[in-house]
């Protein structure tokens, strides 16, 4: 296993699998956030279920491990790729060979990481360890802060850009390389990235103006 994880192919597969796990989590997270439109009782019930369900409580540690692994492998891959890149590559036009999202995955990833730290401080830590009486009130009050909403929307736009390449890259790394599969995966990845970026952003903007 150590030989596999230290190889270029192994690192990409591990990176892809951890990414697919996080992609699934984002859909679940968006589904819970959409219950905000159902009012305090529905969202608080959904939040309470997430906080007390044993399976979900175990999975949050798996999620944390997957996220840490994804970050470590992402940074490791970037450093390995830079070390293996010939000097003459710098003189070429990188835009001719790859898209902006592909070339800047490490930067969008690091900015997203900064937002996640802020997000955990404002939501997870407050709900888990603070004296919060209503999760609904906590979330909607944060969305009344224009600075927070701007940061929130910007972060999810970055996440959408990150996902637009990461989604198809993950499936390609685990075998979806044939043209008939790749085209479908690429389109699905674009649709997914729009869904996540717009879904979370619209919720924040709606409750800012509501």
Image (spheres, helix red, strand yellow):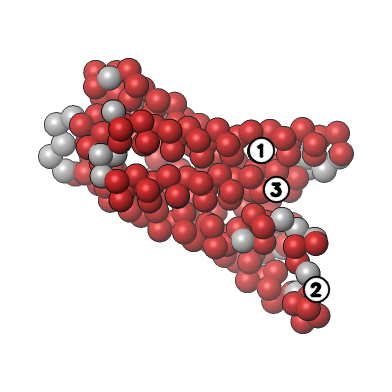
- Looking at the image, tell me whether mark 3 or mark 2 is earlier in sequence order: 2
Query: If the image is split into quadrants, where does the N terminus sit?
Result: bottom right
Name the residue that disc number 2 marks: 92
Q: Nearer the viewer, residue 176 or 165?
A: 165
Name the residue that disc number 3 marks: 169
Q: Is residue 185 left or right of residue 115?
A: right
Figure check: 69 above or below 189: below
Q: Residue at x 82, y 43 (%)?
A: 177
The answer to whether the residue labelled 1 contacts the one labelled 2, judged by CB atoms less than 8 Å apart, is no
- Asked whether the viewer can see residue 78, the reply is yes
> Marks 3 and 2: which is nearer the front?
2
- Label placed on residue 189: 1
3D distance between C-alphas at marks 3 and 1? 9 Å
Q: Nearer the viewer, residue 60 or 112?
A: 112
Q: Secondary structure at mark 2?
A: loop
- Looking at the image, tell me whether mark 3 or mark 1 is earlier in sequence order: 3
Q: Secondary structure at mark 1?
A: helix
Q: Position of residue 207 (x, y in %)?
A: 31, 31
Q: Residue at x 63, y 66 (%)?
A: 78
The answer to whether the residue labelled 3 contacts the one labelled 1, judged by CB atoms less than 8 Å apart, is no
Q: Position of residue 128 (x, y in %)?
A: 23, 41
Circle 2: is it few (<14), some (14-19), or many (20+) Cα within 10 Å? few
3D distance between C-alphas at marks 1 and 2? 28 Å
Q: Residue at x 73, y 48 (%)?
A: 173
Q: Residue at x 64, y 54 (%)?
A: 101
Q: Nearer the viewer, residue 178 or 155?
A: 155
Q: Is residue 101 left or right of residue 200?
A: right
- Asked whether the viewer can see residue 14, the reply is no
Q: Position of residue 143 (x, y in %)?
A: 29, 39
């Amino acid at each position: 296993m150590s030989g596999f994880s230290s190889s270029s192919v192994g690192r990409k597969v591990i990176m892809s699998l951890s990414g697919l796990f996080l992609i699934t989590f984002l859909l679940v997270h968006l589904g819970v956030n959409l219950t905000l439109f159902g009012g305090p009782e529905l969202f608080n019930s959904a939040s309470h279920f997430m906080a007390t369900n044993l399976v979900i409580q175990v999975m949050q540690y798996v999620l944390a491990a997957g996220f840490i692994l994804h970050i470590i492998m992402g940074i490791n891959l970037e450093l390995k790729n830079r070390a293996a890149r010939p000097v003459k590559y710098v003189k070429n036009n990188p835009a001719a060979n790859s898209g902006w999202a592909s070339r800047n995955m490490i930067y969008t990833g690091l900015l997203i990481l900064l937002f996640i730290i802020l997000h955990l401080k404002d939501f997870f830590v407050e709900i888990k360890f603070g004296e919060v009486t209503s999760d609904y009130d906590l979330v909607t009050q944060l969305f009344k802060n224009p600075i927070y909403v701007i940061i929130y929307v910007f972060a999810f736009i970055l996440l959408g850009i990150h996902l637009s390449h990461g989604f198809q890259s993950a499936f390609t790394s685990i075998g979806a390389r044939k043209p008939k599969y790749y085209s479908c995966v690429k389109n699905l990845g674009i649709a997914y990235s729009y869904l996540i970026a717009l879904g979370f952003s619209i919720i924040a903007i709606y409750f800012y103006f509501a």
